Image (cartoon, helix red, strand yellow):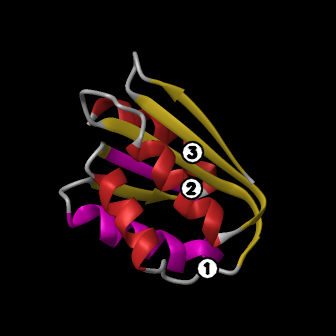
Amino acid sequence: MIEVDADLEEGIVTARFRGAVTNREFIDLATTIANFGSVDRVLVYLDWVGIDRWAFSVPTAGGVNEWRRARKMIARAALVHQPRLNRQAAWLAAFLRKEGVKVRSWRPQNADAAATWLRIV
């Protein structure tokens, strides 16, 4: 499950992943970000700490297109996750960087630093 909280006045989108996450939910998150309609690019905080399992595979062509649309809306992204999710984090970070998005990955114990970096860089 993915919970999304958006504060477009602040320009921040927070997505908290919990329990089992599906690739469909991951693509739906991209669609949600792409459809915010913000004039400026947003800051995205991805909290993956609560993920129990995620049978990740590289998105299909349709999923990649949704993430292409989403990355045009993102200025910076902070990913907070356990080491077991390095594959997912690496794919997303590399994909976002192709559009010039600044991305950093953080361990859960550094979640506060991730939130600070997102707002001040």
As measured in the structure, the alpha-carbon distance from the residue carrying label 2 to the one carrying label 1 is 14 Å
* Between 84 and 110, the one nearer to me in the picture: 84
* Magenta segment: 76-98
Decide: is 115 above or below 97.
Answer: above
Please identify the dominant SS of the magenta region.
helix
* Between 90 and 28, the one nearer to me in the picture: 28
Amino acid carrying label 2: it is Asp
Amino acid carrying label 1: it is Phe
Q: Residue at x 55, y 38 (%)?
A: 14
Task: In the rendered structure, find residue 111 and report the number of the disc placed on it.
Answer: 3
Q: Which residue is mark 1?
A: 56
Number of disc labels: 3
Left or right: where 16 falls relative to 77 = right
Q: SS class of the residue under badge 1?
A: loop
| Residue 93 is inside the magenta segment | yes
Residue 69 visible? yes
N-term mark: 2 or 3: 2
N-term mark: 3 or 1: 1
Q: SS class of the residue under badge 3?
A: helix
Tell me if mark 1 has few (under 14), some (14-19) or many (20+) residues whose alpha carbon lies within 10 angstroms of its own: few
Give how far across and how far down residue 54 sits, in percent: 70, 74
Task: In the rendered structure, find residue 28 and report the number of the disc placed on it.
Answer: 2
Decide: is 32 above or below 86.
Answer: above
Decide: is 47 above or below 21.
Answer: above
